[in-house]
Amino acid sequence: MHQLTLAEIARGLADKKFSSEELTKVLLARIAQLDPQLNSFISLTEDLALTQAKAADARRANGESGALLGAPIAHKDLFCTQGIRTSCGSKMLDNFKAPYDATVVAKLAAAGAVTLGKTNMDEFAMGSANESSYYGAVKNPWNLEHVPGGSSGGSAAAVAARLLPAATGTDTGGSIRQPAALTNLTGLKPTYGRVSRWGMIAYASSLDQGGPLAHTAEDCAILLQGMAGFDPNDSTSIDEPVPDYSASLNGSLQGLRIGVPKEYFSAGLDPRIADLVMASVEELKKLGAVVKEISLPNMQHAIPAYYVIAPAEASSNLSRFDGVRFGYRCADPKNLEDLYKRSRGEGFGTEVQRRIMVGAYALSAGYYDAYYLKAQKIRRLIKNDFMAAFNEVDIILGPTTPNPAWKLGAKNSDPVAAYLEDVYTITANLAGLPGLSMPAGFVDGLPVGVQLLAPYFQEGRLLNVAHQYQLNTDWHTRTPTGF
């Protein structure tokens, strides 16, 4: 059962081959057996899962149907879940139980999805390796000495190890697509505003976006269908109709115009990954796509712009964690200033403190214009580059990451080296565009992903291309040894 995709589970439940309760018990036992190797979960929700599974079986017995009805999933541990610890991978929120469900959690529960638990993540979603978590690093099931990518590395590792068929993640600068690439999954970052951020603990509010991680584009379509839609509680939510993502999967790629940016193939890209990217281009050409070289001239400025904007927003968002209202509080504070300083100093980890300091500096008097304002202007130039490119092509294709997964601890002493792993993904967040990473091969036994980008609200186009690619390749079906 654990090898089934979300789509196969839906068919199995509909055909009464097994019940949601049976499937849930199998996967909970598998998590208990295998997750100690991976550390992919922070909290398991066995009682909730079995209650939801029994309810889903009852709904099916009463004639209800639905692709997510009875399907087991997990949530990245920054989606608020009522009465359940929502830690954000931080000591700061280790004792926080959310008083309400995030919109994403509520929507998926209403569709009948079964929540098995909350997955490990980089602290407050800050990281590219899932090593900054208060609960310890997550291991990559393809090689337990390597990182799974971050910050949604817990969700990625759990799905890649077949502990469950799909999970939610969030993507601020590549945090769905990068771990998807490093663990052989399909991961989708929707258009900014397509999925509600209400109840999703913020890192950088103008960049964060929730999305699905699964084995196939077909499964991502199913999960996105349940997550997407307008939410009046979220002022950045877009009131735009949600199409049937599954209905567009089988469209022909004949005449599809694919752009390959020349800037992607710089000295920083592992040449073996470049070869796999071009092999995927050839595969899509066989399916009728037309390929041309394009240019994204301002891509070189993306990392410095992102690492001003994101920390600036983080310094503002994380100011609410002060030891007063909720979360960690230091022992025996002498006064209010001591309470603030020690609660934050003891509650936040090194990477979070680093980004808060950078962000506060960039927003401070005398530096706002020189750093933050300039970064926002670069952001606009990057968006303009994409708009010009999409006048010529339908999608943009390139590598998801410049390298395969690196060894645990290899970049801990050099945070800039870790930041550079996001070079291909952060532009989509800066521009608010949808992006998808799909499996495209292996380097030294470690998975490699190819990234697709599309115009606003064209998630269906990304899913269609990835699905057609996956019908003609088998990379996404490979399973790590031992899992």
Image: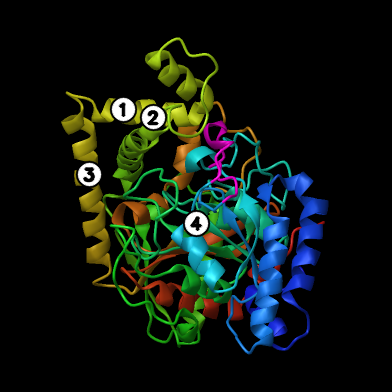
Give the foreground label among 3 and 4. 4
Q: Residue at x 82, y 56 (%)?
A: 482
Name the kind of residue labelled 3 in the image.
Gln
For mark 1, give the secondary structure: helix
For mark 3, give the secondary structure: helix
For mark 4, give the secondary structure: loop
In primary-sequence order, the first of circles 3 and 2 is: 2
Name the kind of residue labelled 1 in the image.
Ala
Nearer the observer, 35 or 143: 35
Q: Are marks 1 and 4 in contact (CB under 8 Å)?
A: no
Q: How many marks?
A: 4
Pointer 1: residues within 10 angstroms few (<14), some, or many (20+)? some
Q: Which residue is mark 2?
A: 356
Q: Which residue is mark 1?
A: 360
For mark 2, give the secondary structure: helix
Q: Are marks 4 and 2 in contact (CB under 8 Å)?
A: no
In primary-sequence order, the first of circles 1 and 4 is: 4
Q: Which residue is mark 3?
A: 376
How far apart are labels 3 and 2 at the CA level?
A: 18 Å
Name the kind of residue labelled 2 in the image.
Ile
Nearer the observer, 7 or 146: 7
Q: Are marks 3 and 2 in contact (CB under 8 Å)?
A: no
Q: Are marks 1 and 2 in contact (CB under 8 Å)?
A: yes
Q: Are marks 3 and 1 in contact (CB under 8 Å)?
A: no
How far apart are labels 3 and 1 at the CA level?
A: 16 Å
Pointer 4: residues within 10 angstroms few (<14), some, or many (20+)? some
Residue 372 vertical placement versus 450 (above, below): above
Q: Which residue is mark 4?
A: 101
Looking at the rendering, the stretch of residues picked out in magenta corresponds to: 83-97
- Viewer can see residue 59: yes
Q: Is the stretch drawn in magenta largely helix, strand or loop?
A: loop
Q: Residue at x 39, y 16 (%)?
A: 336
